[in-house]
Image: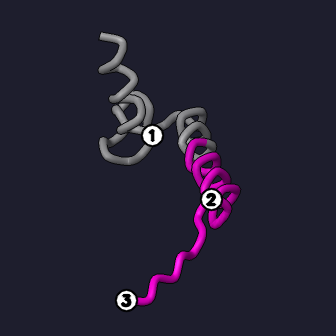
Amino acid sequence: MHWTHFVTWLEICGGCKPLPEAWQAKRRFAMLRALWWLALLLLALAFAGRTTKFIYVDF
């Protein structure tokens, strides 16, 4: 039961599902979504290009 609530929350934060009516007028939930996307962007920028190495293979 808790797992489905977590998945639903992630889908709402990610934009897959629309916000419930009660959340649409609240600034707190808009800020939560903005912080979520900012955290994802910062993680992507922090790890971009650091763990991959170019391997050239000539056949």
**Cα separation between marks 3 and 2:** 25 Å
Circle 3 or circle 1, nearest the eye: 3
Secondary structure under tag 1 reads helix
Relative to 14, 36 lies left or right: right
Near-viewer residue (22 or 51): 51
Within the magenta stretch, is there residue 29? no
Amino acid beneath label 3: Phe
| Of the image marks 1 and 2, the number of the one nearer the N terminus | 1
Q: How is the image coloured?
A: one colour
Secondary structure under tag 3 reads loop
Instruction: Residue at the far front: name it.
Output: 59
Q: Which residues are magenta?
A: 36-59
**Cα separation between marks 1 and 2:** 27 Å
Residue sitting at x 61%, y 41%: 31
| Of the image marks 3 and 1, the number of the one nearer the N terminus | 1
To which residue does mark 3 refer? 59
Above or below, comparing residue 7 to residue 24 in the picture: above
To which residue does mark 1 refer? 13
Residue sitting at x 60%, y 33%: 28
Near-viewer residue (34 or 41): 41
Q: Quadrant of residue 44?
A: bottom right
Amino acid beneath label 2: Thr
Give how far across and how far down residue 8 sits, in percent. 33, 29
To which residue does mark 2 refer? 51
